[in-house]
Amino acid sequence: MIDHRLTHRCLLADIASGDDLHSGKPNLTLQTLLLIGFVTRQPNPDRTYAHLALTEAGHRYLAGLWH
């Protein structure tokens, strides 16, 4: 069984650190977080990759996953 709390916490923590770049089609977990508004994509001008960033709701969700 997949532990979604751990999966979301790891992914959101990577994005919050600023180290996460994304190219290509996002996986299902990332798609879900994008659709519900916890993560936003900030495209690079040359369109080869996108920077991912947490929204305010994403920061609150991540904070709640630590408890």
Image (cartoon, rainbow, N blue to C red):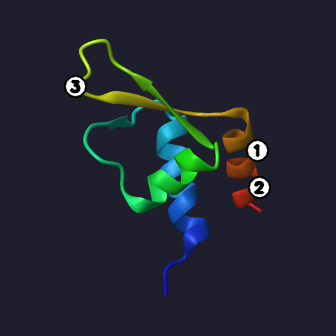
Q: Are marks 1 and 3 in contact (CB under 8 Å)?
A: no
Tell me residue 18's x, y (percent).
47, 30
- The amino acid marked with disc number 2 is Gly
Q: Secondary structure at mark 3?
A: loop
Tell me residue 56's x, y (percent).
72, 34
Q: In the drawing, does residue 12 fall left or right of residue 58?
A: left
Q: Which mark is residue 48?
A: 3
Q: Earlier in the sequence, mark 1 or mark 3?
A: 3
Residue reaching furthest to the front: 35
Tell me residue 39's x, y (percent).
56, 40
Q: Secondary structure at mark 2?
A: helix
Give the crowd class for mark 1: few <14, some 14-19, many >=20 residues within 10 Å.
few
The residue under label 1 is 60
Q: Nearer the viewer, residue 21 or 32?
A: 32
The residue under label 2 is 64
Q: Earlier in the sequence, mark 3 or mark 2?
A: 3
